Image: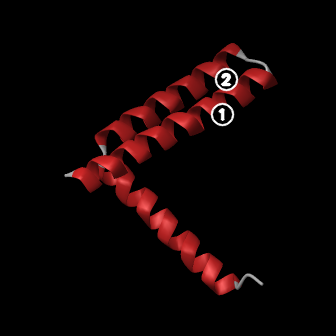
Amino acid sequence: MIRLGRLLKSYSYAVRGLIKTFREEQNLKIQTFLSLLVLILGIYFRISRIDWAILFIVFCLVLTAVITNSAVERITD
């Protein structure tokens, strides 16, 4: 059985880690800015739902790669 308090504590650690990474990593800021720019352009050009789904998957993959790269760099430094 999953304890709700333990789960919430785990998520709070994850969110704090993401915030810390966003504050410290320039590449994450750049990728986030570019993702927001693409979102705005997607709204402007009224792209289809399938294109939105593809963009969402690509955004998640890119941000995951940037965060993973930052973690590996931190470990190896």
Residue under numbered circle 1:
56
Which quadrant holds residue 55? top right
* Residue 65 x %, y %: 46, 39
Residue 38 drawn above or below residue 24 = above
Q: Residue at x 64, y 77 (%)?
A: 7
The local crowd at label 1, few if under 14, some if 14 to 19, many if 20 or more residues have their Cα within 10 Å, is some
The quadrant of the image that shows the N terminus is bottom right
Left or right relative to 49: residue 27 = left
For the residue pair 57 and 33, the one nearer the viewer reads as 57
The three-letter code of the residue at mark 1 reads Phe
User: Marks 1 and 2, Cα distance to the nearest angstrom?
Assistant: 13 Å
The three-letter code of the residue at mark 2 reads Ile
Residue lying at the far left of the rendered structure: 77
Label 2: which secondary element: helix
Label 1: which secondary element: helix
Residue under numbered circle 2:
43
Q: Are marks 1 and 2 in contact (CB under 8 Å)?
A: no
